[in-house]
Image (spheres, rainbow, N blue to C red):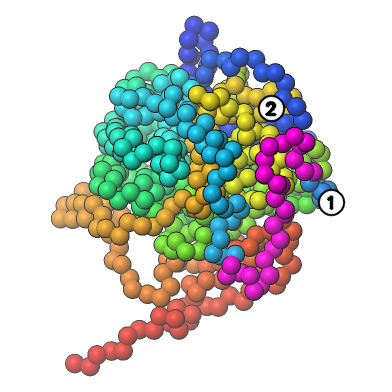
Amino acid sequence: MTRRLTSAAILALAGSASLAVVLTITGAVPAVSQPALPQPAAPAAPAAQPAAAAPAPSTATLAPAATAPAPPAVAAPAAAPVPAAPAGATAPTPAQPQPAAAPGDLNAAMARPFGRHGPLTERERAMAETAWQYFVKSYQPDTGLVNAVGSYPSTTLWDTGSYISALVAARELRLIDKREFDLRANLLIKTLRNLDLFRGEMPNKVYNTKTGQKVDYANKPGEVGHSVLDIGRMLVWLKILKERYPYLAPGIDATVLRWNFCNTVKPDGSLFGSVLSKGETRYVQEGRLGYEQYAAKGFELWGFGSAAALSPDPLEYTEIFGVRVPIDGRDPRIFGNMNYVLTESYLLDGLELGWKLPGDMSNDTPGLATQGWRAEFANRIYLVQQRRFEETGIMTARSEHQVDGAPFFVYDSIWANGFAWSTLDPSDVYRPERAAIAAKAAIGMWALWETPYTDLLMEAVGDLSTEDGGFYEGLYENGNGYIPLQTANNNGIILAALLYKEQGPILQHLNTNTQVWDTAFTHQDTRANRCLPQPKPVQACCNCQAAAPEPGVPAADFLYCRPVVQADGSIAATACGLEPHGLPAPVTVAAAATTAQMCPLPPRVQP
């Protein structure tokens, strides 16, 4: 798999017209929109597909592109001024570009979330209410699950994570009361607790939302494997539920305690999913730069060691419009997995986790990304898309997404297969006509970067919705109107972005209770048999934000975010800007010496 190629695309035949529906674990591809929206045709019958992975039936590998890729990227042009929002726009006064913080302002920068922060405006609240309507309309009352795409009764764990995202946002933004939240949450936990697992190990890639039964890609009873990237996203959101609502923790713990992680988390911390090949189960490494690290954080939040998956190595860069864009260094011709560069995983990490290390238990520094390279790379992923607009006039907010009709799903890449701005279908066929401004990417970037360009993106997609069905996937960049599909992933991420604007990073460490996750099976061999992490004793120390130095990106490579060397040697980031800060890299102090100075051992008591 590549980045989040997990559950792969699910091509299911729906209805008499044999409408193929792609169940994807991620979501939409960014579309570059034209100035005006053409009058769209009536939406097509919703396609079925669990949004959480790549649309290919295999989660392991994708063949290299079969057709000519997009033209090469333009190298380092000078940035042009960003135009203001279109005349007649109803948005608030456009934001001014964020200047890099002066050294004396770093503490203030750390105390304030990245991007936009404050109460929702009347318009933004109406957007939240609209996005929530998707989860009203597509809800299955017998199971508590929500359809991944429109009315098609199928979903994946990635899409179910997006539903939990929407549920938390709806409660926190006061769209629903506690009674509705509790009824929905407890029914969902019950269904997840009783899922029929793939090979008795881990959740299957696809489930029928009406019955809760595991199914194949045609939504027929069966099984197809498990997606470690989907499961990683689910673990992030189950952790958020536990922390924000401690009374739900016992049921959540009971759910995850059923899973067997032995074939999923390897001793070196790499993460493996599974596929069925001619009736045989094959375990395959999943994820590329971006999605791999996001999923690894989900596992780390539950105590699993996933160092290999959390690391950015092997890391390379490619220059596009003067921005050094990070790319995965694994060659698709050798490993069989594409290394698309997409926006979504970086957005999710910022909105949900604040680009923090999984071991960071602090809640009071939302503007300090303790996994600093993730914030630096996310800033570049945003900036290169703004630069493309400045140089070409093509509005850009790129992510994978579904499309109406064949090929049903595309990876709208910033870079893939050696080319910039390459839109590929699951067979790696070049499909530039399917490039689009993804609504989730546009609104996610709007939340995390307060700039005139994200104001413009908001104007492009902020009203592409129906009152009773939520937001459409996005807007085609070639003027062919909007994508007439509504999905759980798209609307869930939009709600998360709006919640972030009001509250900052969504994961808040609030639950100090004893956890069933840590105490279960204490005197049994079940923990070892299922490869569950052993409970770790709580250590009293002065600097417990990060458990160990972060591998990967040196402070000298932080061009847009201010690097902040932590006491343990890891590098955090704050005060990200859109121009290189030009400051010298900070001096890294040996972690062991610093720890000894800050956390001296207590004096030895003489017998």
Using the numbered discs, state the Cα–Cα distance from disc 2 to disc 1 in whole angstroms.
26 Å
Q: Residue at x 57, y 70 (%)?
A: 107
Q: Secondary structure at mark 2?
A: strand
Our reading of the magenta stretch's main secondary structure is: loop
Left or right of 350, for residue 156: left
Q: Residue furthest left?
A: 523
Reply above or below: 87 against 241: above
| Callout 2 crowding tier (Cα within 10 Å): few <14, some 14–19, many ≥20 | many
Q: Quadrant of residue 223?
A: top left
Amino acid identity at mark 1: Ala
Residue 383 image offset from top left, x and y in percent: 70, 49
Reply above or below: 587 against 526: below
Q: Magenta includes 94?
A: yes
Reply above or below: 535 against 236: below
Q: Residue at x 44, y 67 (%)?
A: 545
Amino acid identity at mark 2: Tyr
Residue 405 image offset from top left, x and y in percent: 60, 17
Q: Which residue is mark 2?
A: 476
Q: Nearer the viewer, residue 48 or 365?
A: 365
Q: Residue 78, labelled with which disc?
A: 1
Residue 447 image offset from top left, x and y in percent: 59, 47
Q: Nearer the viewer, residue 228 or 96?
A: 96
